[in-house]
Amino acid sequence: MTIAARIAKPSQYLKGATGDWEIVIGLEVHAQVASNAKLFSGASTAFGGAPNDHVSLVDAAMPGMLPVINEECVKQAIRTGLGLEAQINLKSVFDRKNYFYPDLPQGYQISQFKSPIVGEGTIRLDMEDGETVEVGVERLHLEQDAGKSIHDQSPTHTFVDLNRSGVALMEIVSKPDMRSADEAKAYLAKLRTILRYLGTCDGDMDKGNMRADVNVSVRKPGGELGTRCEIKNVNSIRFVGQAIDFEAHRQIGIIEDGGSIKQETRLFDPGKGETRSMRSKEEAHDYRYFPDPDLLPLEFDQTLVDALKADLPELPDAKKARFVADYGVTPYDAMVLTLERPSADYFEAVAKGRNAKLAANWVINELFGRLNKEGKSIEESPVSAAQLGGIVDLIEDGTISGKIAKDLFEIVWAEGGDPKELVEKRGLKQVTDTGAIEAAIDAVMAANPDKVAQAKAKPTLAGWFVGQVMKATGGKANPQAVNEILKAKLGIE
Ligand code: ADP
Ligand code: MG
């Protein structure tokens, strides 16, 4: 095995009793292909049907049934490969991976082993400190999902639901290129974003439509790769982070106590925040892989690949770069705005023809903040892009202050309506009439001679007056005008 090239930054090292340690992580992600029918049968992939409602004779492995490849699943795998900037293999092979599972009626899983449909690719991670980390993708292959054993409906029986049996999965295997729990979390988030942009997987981890096997080892910085443990089927990004932190410390403890790591498969227990051994790791040769005699090798032309490529949507990295160039937003803001395609579209609708930085600020801080708080998605936003654009227009042309704009946002959120009309009807217009502002300032100064004296001596105290004047005018005074007139009256600079 080659030594992985990337070396962690010292800030990513873990401290042990014998010095620094580096964590090495590789992820195998199972992503359910977005498709109406299963990989080798016409049965539905709909979620939530009654048990065994979506099972064809092929999925139940009745004698004499033959698999037929679903073209749409193949296209989805190619689109995903293109989105990961990966090698697309015009010829690939389906193999049988033999193992017994009560919910796998065939007695084997049809998968791809030596010749996957997609080869090496790259995923770029946008880290919080602004750094971009490149993680290699080893391969992507197509395979069938298994059914589900249900153990909690009877004390003496296990039931089997084959609805999921035969559903197409893409297994996306990374290189061991990640060096911290944060990088692994960023990888999953980025992969999910890319899959959703492409429309090839909905990325819904709650439903099990995307799940990760997390491979973790530790080594002395820059040293030989250590023995890895694989934590199976972790189903949330947060749990992936917790599992890695726990597992790395566990391995360091064992090695520093003079022990060695056994390669094994482990499970993460979210309740306890720890991993525990499930079984010793099986080797590929244990599965007796061989090419499935029921299926010809999968072959297609470059023209199909080119056609699919021409149809791809703009992907997150490209969109992010364009937002920085076209709208002048920071790379970090551009990243936040492009996490989901509908959010990016929403932002563009608000920003076009307006002050884009102001628009970005309102979309990220006010809108996203409020949506998060209420657990709503952008599609469920009570404030449309046209309405938020209307609010931004009113700030830009000086009709309302930023403070009033927040109140207006609340009104539109709760009651709907046209921002401009609301401002008229409710008298929310900013007071720029200097006479009115002067009068308000005079009144506050007259009532507080002690504060006037203090502010004259210490100009930073003038802020108190601004607050009082804003209060007196119901937040409608133009803050800039208040500041200027106040300074002149107090005789400060
Ligand atoms: P399998 O687990 O099915 O045997 P692979 O050999 O393809 O499959 O490796 C699975 C994953 O383990 C890959 O994501 C790879 O990056 C990762 N991996 C390999 N070696 C290490 C290591 N020493 N430490 C951490 N991850 C590793
Ligand atoms: Mg594995």
Image: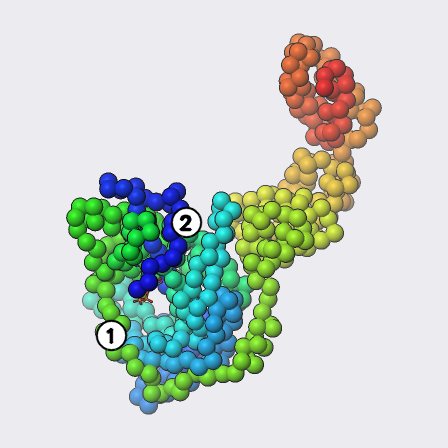
Residue placed farthest to the left in the image? 258
Residue appearing at x 27%, y 72% in the figure: 284
Q: How far apart are marks 1 and 2 (CA)?
A: 33 Å
Q: Is residue 107 above or below residue 338?
A: below
Is residue 127 positioned above or below 198 on the image? above
Q: From the viewer's perspective, is residue 93 above or below residue 16?
A: below
For mark 2, does the 10 Å Cα neighbourhood hold few (<14), some (14 to 19), or many (20 or more) residues? some
Of the pair 101 and 139, the residue shown nearer to us:
139
- Residue 280 location in percent, x, y? 20, 63
Local secondary structure at mark 2: helix
- Number of dots carrying numbers: 2
Viewed as shown, does residue 8 lie left or right of 285? Answer: right
Q: Identify the residue position indicated by label 1 in the image.
A: 285
Q: Within the image, what quadrant is residue 96 found in?
A: bottom left
Quarter of the image where ligand 1 sits? bottom left
Q: Which residue is tagged 2?
A: 182
